[in-house]
Amino acid sequence: MGKTHAAVTGVFGWVPEDKLTNFDLEKLVDTNDEWIRSRTGIEERRILRTPGWATSDMCAEAVKGLLEKTGTKPGEIDLLIVATVTGDMVFPDTANTVCDKVGAKNAFGFDLGAACSGFLFALSTGAQFVQAGTYKKVVVVGADMMSSIIDYTDRNTCVIFGDGAGAVLLEPCKDGNGVVDFVLRGDGAGRELLHMKAGGSLHPASNETVARREHYAWQDGKRVFVQAVKGMTGACDELMRRNHLTKEDVAWVVPHQANMRIITSVAEHLGFPMEKITVNIQKYGNTTAGTLPLCLWEYENQFKKGDNIILTAFGGGFTWGALLLKWAY
Ligand code: UT7
């Protein structure tokens, strides 16, 4: 009997129907379609506008689709982790709400931050419970309703972000497929360059924080860009080296979708042709914790059993990393 790994046995994504195109943004800020396309690769993003809906509803849609697709009953889920920085409320955790909305009566759940690296951190966390034999069915969701924290007068952020959710099911597997290894990193000094300043214990909500527009995501885009390329390239490199993988051994790289120029730069540094890189940024923009599972969802039909897939991300914190997943179906 081989070692137990946590295999991804299903993936499902959900995005809102409403689109915010580059032409719509031209009416909101001083920008234009040509600039956004050439500097970011984004053409449109999805925005959640259903009254009364929030991140938990996007998660619930993704999880319901996942359960149906994998023939899993809600009561069979042991643990549900939601990676997000736009939870419905400061507390309770959105994962608890999602469990309630999908009828996961026997599960416990918690949220995990880590911004754009959230799904990567949550996937590796969930995998540990499965690999250790503690749980048999773990659902990992990456979801963000970025439109709830974006300043649509700030062209440095509003052109990039969108809303969306994706979910995977993790189950034990003994044939060598599943989560094999991961390299995860953080550097808290990066908090100065990418954050949402107010609403936490440091700057609780007040008239002043609202007037200063501190309840919106803010970034020093240029400096984040440089660190993102460096972080993802370094993590992938280390992961491949210690697993004795050449570029030829890797079937796919699934990078966080923040900016097309970051994606191509990482691919170039690592020497991968773009045919091996999953890209859907043109349709959804940067959905923060949603990008990786949404990519898995969209490329699922092209993956083959046993494929070495490297997921990599970089985000607020700073947080970053890379994870080696052997596709199980
Ligand atoms: O998910 C993890 C977190 N985020 C990221 O990874 C994002 C990383 N950063 C980025 O994606 C990019 O830095 C941005 C898309 C935010 C900005 O692109 P950039 O190529 O770094 O632009 P820039 O700030 O260097 O500005 C270049 C020029 C400037 O004009 P001048 O000074 O050269 O005349 C800006 O004023 O482009 C101008 N500009 C814009 N023009 C039209 C900046 N933003 C815009 C805009 N529309 N939205």
Image: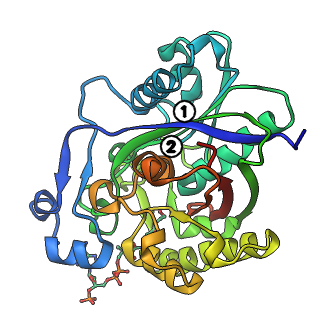
Find disc 1 in the rendering and name its residue.
90
Q: Quadrant of residue 52?
A: top left
* Image quarter hosting the N terminus: top right
Residue at 19% in and 51% down: 20
Looking at the image, what colour scheme do you see? rainbow
Q: Cβ–Cβ below 8 Å for labels 2 and 1?
A: yes
Ligand 1, image quadrant it occupies: bottom left
Find disc 2 in the rendering and name its residue.
199
* Image quarter hosting the C terminus: top right
Residue type, numbered disc 1: Val
Rounded to the nearest angstrom, the CA distance separating label 2 from label 1 is 9 Å
Q: Quadrant of residue 324?
A: bottom right
In the image, 293 versus 173, the foreground residue is 173
Q: Is residue 55 visible?
A: yes
Rendering coords of residue 182 (x, y %): 74, 59
Residue at 17% in and 65% down: 29
